[in-house]
Each structure stands twice: as C-alpha cells, then as structure tokens.
Image: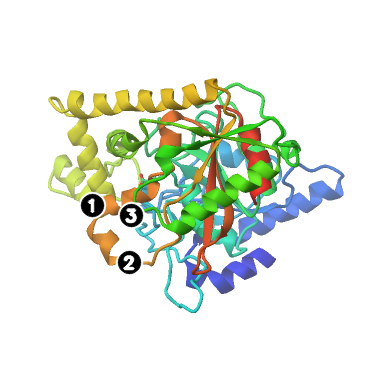
C-alpha cells in the first residue's frame, strides 16, 4: 500500500508507470502475508516490483508501449515474471519504455516520455531517464518500486541505470528465458533487473534466471547464489582497461570517473591491465544493422489480425497498411525500413552478412582478452550524464541518439554479461555510472566487483 500511495502521488510528474495494478498488488501481498504466517515463503516474499511493459503479464496491459498493441492483454505470463511471482514477489504495475524497446531516452513511447527524478543542481530542466527501460530506472530511483524488470538489446538496462544512479545488469545471453518477452532483436535481447544497489540486483537476477523449454536459447546451467559473491576479495583478479573506449570528445569528468574506478579496484586488490578490443569502433554501425534487421522480421506479426489495433481498409492489404501506418511510431518505422533494406536481395551480402562477420570479430576480441587471463573489463557506462527532454539536436539526428550506446552495444553483440553501477556525480550533480563486462555466465564476478565500486 505504501508503494501504491507513492505511485499515486509521484507518477503524475514522472510518467514511469503506464498501468498500476492496485487490486492485483494488494491481493498478491495478502497471499504473501499468508504464506509468511504459515512459515512458508520464497526469496522475494512480499517484495513489490514494477514490470517493464515488454513482459507479457497474464490478463494485464502488455503493449510494449506501442499503439499497435492497443488493448492487448496476454493469456500467458512471461517466464521471467512467473519466476518472480513463484518466489513471492508482488506486481505493482507496468512500466513505461521506448516503443518496442527502441530508443535511448524513453521518448519514443506511445505513452509519452518518462521524466528522470534527478535534476541538475540549480536547474529545473526536465531530464530523460535513458532508455529503453526508462520507466524501470525512474521508478526504482524514485522509490516507486523496490526493484524492476528491464531488458537490454544494446544498452537498455545499463544506460538508464547510469542516468538514474541505479544498478542494472544485463546477464549473459541465455541466462534468462526470453519466452513471453516481446521480441525486438532476438539474438541480442536479454532480461535483467534494475535495482537500488548491487545486492538487490543479485537477489533479483537469481530469481529471474532459469533454463526454459520454451526458449531454446536459454541455457541449462545452475544459477549461482549471486548474493554470496558480495564482499569477496578481488585479490588475484585482473581487470582490463580497453583503450578503444577512450573515445573522441569524451568529457573529462567521465575520464576522471573511470580513473577513480580503477583506483578503487586496485585498492581492493585487483591488478589493472591495459587491453585492446580492436573492433570496438565497428560495433555501433554493425548493431544498427543487425538489430533493425531482426526487428523488421519480428515486427511483421503486427498485422491488425492477431494483436491489438486494427484500422479497417478496403481489402486485407489496405487494412495491413493502414494498421501498421497508424500503429507504429516514427522510430519503429525507421527501424523496419532499415531492417527490410539490409535483408533484401542484393543488399543482404553487403550489409547484413558483413555486420554478422563484424559481430564475430567483436566477440573474438573479447575471447582473446579473457583467454589472456583478464577476469573483467571496466569502462564508463555512458558517454555523458542524463540529457534534457526533447533535446533539439538529438531529435533532428537519430545517429547522435544512437551514439549513447557506444559503450554498451559491444556487450550484446558478444552475448556477454555487463553491469552498470553508480560511481559518482558529475559537476552538475547528476549520476554517472561505470560498466563492468564479464566472461559468459560469470555474473558473480561482476556483482562482487561492482559491489566494491558502489
Ligand atoms: N538504444 C538502443 C536501441 O535503440 C538499445 C535499445 C535496447 O537495448 N533495447 O536500439
């Protein structure tokens, strides 16, 4: 009830929730109380969570913040959310996000932008919370839930976490089931938590992760007790610092933050080594071919017949066209057009196939570094702190918006785990995050290292 009250008083200004499931929350909480009174109870008993609108929740608004899914209430529950409920968690509602998780500012949502609860010192300018999991990050930062689910295709957990002073982890591809999560780019999408600290993120991921017969890319590996790794020594660990992440025009304070992080890890006993990931500069262009290609294919199913919105036409083709024209927003249409183009005969070899090859090279860069004994890689999480809502330069130039993902997309391209952890404030008093990248399925290393930084 306290969380529902907080949502009622603060959500108007933040627009983090697009649906609040009051009754469901209270009845789930009651059931939780009863289990506890009976001496039972799971790892998350009674913990109130917000759920990104990308996760299918049975009988509850699930629209990926798109107009095309108007009125869609699935008859099934995503595996990740089911895992949380099975451990006793309580659902507060559905969280705002960029439409179909395409964006870095949460401004492409059909439901309007999410407002970051942070302000620069002495300023009242509204800032974005990052995207696409902007609602998740803002809700966690503003205490409108104890933790939230999120997804990350190119940075959508880590960038909003960094912009809001929260912790977000994208686990290894395959750690969480994608079943029941609206697909954006299936070979890159992963679910993960956004939480107030590393410990909460560790507890939430433990519950979210599982192998799942309904997602053949989920991996059958034991899910460790991540919380147990917190507080362990970093002695004997090697942390790599990739020179390619020192990008042109990177603000001095980001560099300073990075150096501060290095010093903290050194103090905790880790050895710091310079490394090279030579194909880093191709990651962003390759991502913006692979992700739209997969998106154009995944979004073909929204045809006005099976889900949500239908705009009638004079025949079926006309109905498809009218529905898709009215249902998808500008950024989603841009991705469908790019994706369709790079997959079409004559262009496939030049773009999509090339991008897939580049992806392999990016993956190999990481493999070599890990093979040489590096345990984790430390980088900034974002090239800046949160920027203003409706920034004119970004609105006019989608590529400038895509540059937000410069430090995060490589991790998705290589399928690796990555965590963003708050590391300080910039000179405007806004949060900045550092990112740790780990070996496949070694999320524990990220949690214990991030715990030293937070
Ligand atoms: N900002 C990136 C994009 O728009 C990443 C989004 C995501 O991780 N879902 O594609």
Q: Is mark 1 within 8 Å of ligand 1?
A: no
Query: Who comes first in sequence, dot 1 or dot 3?
Result: 3
x then y, percent, for residue 390: 33, 66
Q: Residue at point 25% right, 24% down?
A: 353
Number of residues whose C-alpha sits closer than 10 Å to that of mark 3, classed few (under 14), some (14–19) or many (20 or more)? many
- Circle 3 is placed at which residue position? 67
Q: Position of residue 22 (x, y in %)?
A: 60, 61
Please say if 14 is above or below 123. Answer: above
Instruction: State whether label 2 is within 8 Å of ligand 1.
Output: no
Pointer 2 residue = 390
Question: In the rendered structure, which disc, 1 or 2, sits on the residue that comes first in sequence?
Answer: 1
Mark 3 to mark 2: distance in Å? 21 Å
The answer to which of marks 3 and 2 sits earlier in the sequence is: 3
Horizontally, is 106 left or right of 259 in the view? left
Q: Is residue 278 above or below residue 399?
A: above
Residue that numbered label 1 is attached to: 311
The CB of the residue at mark 3 lies under 8 Å from ligand 1:
no
Asked whether, in this view, residue 234 is left or right of residue 185, the answer is right
Ligand 1, by image quadrant, is top left
Element class at badge 3: helix
Splitting the image into 4 quarters, where does residue 1 fall? bottom right
């Amino acid at each position: 009830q306290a969380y529902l009250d907080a949502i009622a008083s603060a959500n108007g200004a933040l627009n983090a929730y697009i649906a609040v499931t009051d009754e469901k929350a209270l009845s789930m909480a009651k059931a939780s109380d009863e289990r506890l009174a009976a001496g039972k109870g799971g790892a998350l008993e009674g913990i109130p969570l917000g759920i990104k609108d990308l996760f299918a929740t049975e009988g509850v608004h699930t629209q990926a913040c798109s107009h095309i899914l108007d009125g869609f209430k699935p008859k099934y529950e995503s595996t990740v959310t089911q895992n949380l409920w099975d451990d006793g968690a309580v659902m507060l509602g559905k969280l705002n996000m960029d439409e179909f998780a395409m964006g870095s500012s949460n401004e492409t949502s059909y439901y309007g932008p999410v407002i970051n609860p942070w302000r620069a010192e002495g300023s009242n300018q509204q800032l974005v919370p990052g995207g696409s999991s902007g609602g998740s990050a803002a809700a966690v930062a503003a205490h409108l839930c104890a933790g939230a689910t999120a997804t990350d295709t190119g940075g959508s957990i880590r960038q909003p976490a960094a912009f809001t002073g929260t912790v977000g982890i994208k686990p290894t591809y395959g750690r969480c089931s994608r079943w029941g999560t609206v697909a954006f780019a299936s070979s890159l999408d992963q679910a993960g938590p956004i939480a107030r600290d590393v410990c909460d993120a560790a507890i939430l991921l433990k519950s979210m992760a599982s192998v799942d017969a309904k997602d053949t890319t989920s991996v059958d590996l034991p899910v460790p007790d991540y919380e147990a790794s917190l507080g362990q020594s970093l002695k004997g660990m090697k942390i790599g610092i990739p020179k390619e992440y020192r990008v042109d025009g990177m603000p001095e304070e980001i560099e300073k933050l990075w150096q501060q992080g290095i010093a903290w890890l050194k103090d905790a006993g880790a050895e710091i080594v310079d490394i090279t990931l030579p194909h880093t500069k191709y990651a962003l262009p390759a991502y913006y071919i692979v992700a739209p290609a997969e998106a154009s294919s995944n979004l073909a199913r929204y045809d006005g017949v099976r889900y949500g919105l239908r705009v009638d036409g004079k025949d079926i083709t006309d109905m498809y066209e009218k529905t898709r024209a009215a249902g998808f927003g500008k950024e989603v249409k841009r991705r469908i057009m790019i994706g369709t183009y790079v997959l079409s005969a004559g262009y496939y070899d030049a773009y999509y196939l090339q991008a897939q090859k580049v992806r392999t090279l990016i993956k190999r860069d990481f493999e070599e570094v890990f093979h040489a004994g590096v345990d984790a890689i430390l980088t900034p999480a974002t090239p800046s702190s949160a920027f203003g809502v409706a920034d004119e330069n970004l609105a006019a130039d989608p590529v400038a918006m895509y540059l937000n993902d410069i430090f995060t997309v490589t991790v998705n391209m290589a399928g690796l785990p990555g965590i963003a952890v708050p590391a300080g404030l910039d000179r405007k008093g806004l949060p900045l995050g550092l990112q740790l990248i780990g070996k496949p399925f070694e999320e524990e290393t990220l949690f214990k290292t991030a715990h030293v930084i937070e």
